[in-house]
Image: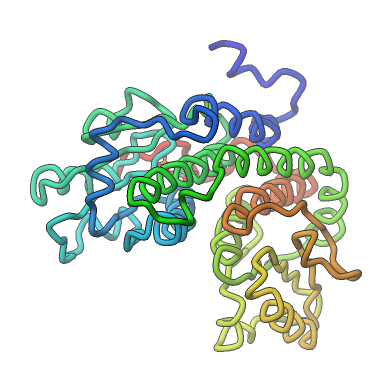
Amino acid sequence: DAADINKGAYPYYMLKEIDEQPAVIHRIQSAYLNKNEVQLNSNLMDKLTNASRIYIVGAGTSYHAGLVGKHLFEKIAQIPTEVVVSSEFAYDDPLIEQDAFFIFLSQSGETADSRQVLVRVNDEWKKPSLTITNVANSTLAREAEFSVTLEAGPEIAVASTKAYTAQIALEAIIATAIGRTKNFEMAQNLDIDLELSKVANAMQAVVDEKGRIEQVAVDNLSDTRNAFYIGRGLDYFVALEASLKLKEISYIQAEGFASGELKHGTIALIEKGTPVLGIITQPQTADNTRSNLQETKARGANVITIVSESLAQTEDTLIIPDVNPDFAPLVSVVVGQLMAYYATLQRGYNVDQPRNLAKSVTVE
Ligand code: G6P
């Protein structure tokens, strides 16, 4: 409604949409959970549970939400999952197995690249599909067999924020539902409602600390030409999204990198003062990422760390509250969103209307 698309006291929609994320998580909980029980269409659940492979299709930020989804579907639902960039997959020659299921992630539900894949899913491969979108009657919602809505409210800023976190929350809920139907212990023991409440609280703590993030952005990103985000596993996927946010609106040439891969070539780009932002929320790779950060520091990098509380050390830059590590992207990405926002303000660009970009891209 009108209130939703008014930015009120906010200078930019992007900041309003970042701040709304805890409330969006709560709306998703109300819409899809009854206490800890998942409420989804039973035909949809049957088809998902019988899938031998899930394909997640998306573009841009939605593709990045799909990368996190792959981890969740494989770990919680135990279904092999591939994530594909829609503009590539639309013209590839993939081997589609009999019991494949396609999940489309699209904030707008109108992205032509993703629709082109859905046309093949329907006409050529004849497989079941689900669109997860913010726009209930959009093209992708209408043309897929099933659709669910993100409950994120209108997203106006070109740089997507709350749609990304909403997509991941829904992927977590759907993966949990599948895992429980299959009697997987992990899914049965997972109190998804409680975990998402913890995530919403942690997100709130991050947005409440935005002054500190602004200071880090101003101190480190005001006049740099380039920057790197690095991490491993889920932290790497957030590094990709956080760097996309930075390039989209601040025009800093930012790259997200798997931290261990850096030394196999890209570390050649590190110079004195190059900002390297390390994301550390995954206990099993925290030490590895720290030593990769050390390698960049030895070559002059300006290291900035974003670390979960239980993994934090005294020299860390930004500490974020602990949540279940499988859901940590929902919290760490908020730091990346705010970092991009404040770097852009500082550099004097229009946060909501970056050059060359459109909110919804309806050409291939
Ligand atoms: C455009 C937007 C991106 C978005 C992508 C996919 O390029 O600028 O922010 O991530 O499309 O959009 P969708 O609506 O399909 O999620």
- Judged left or right of residue 170, residue 86 is left
Residue at image x 81%, y 73%? 302
Q: Position of residue 136 (x, y in %)?
A: 37, 24
Check the image and report above or below for 232 versus 165.
below
Q: Nearer the viewer, residue 195 or 119?
A: 195
Check the image and report above or below for 152 versus 342.
above
Residue at image x 23%, y 36%? 144
Q: How is the image coloured?
A: rainbow
Q: Position of residue 360 (x, y in %)?
A: 42, 36
Q: Nearer the viewer, residue 229 or 157?
A: 229
Quadrant containing ligand 1: top left
Quadrant of residue 77 within the rendered picture: bottom left
Q: Position of residue 10 (x, y in %)?
A: 74, 26
Furthest residue in direction right, as rendered: 314
Report the number of discs.
0
Residue at image x 72%, y 71%? 276
Quadrant of residue 133 within the rendered picture: top left
Check the image and report above or below for 188 versus 32.
below
Check the image and report above or below for 176 versus 78.
above
Residue at image x 22%, y 50%? 50
Furthest residue in direction top, as rendered: 2
- Judged left or right of residue 159, residue 7 is right
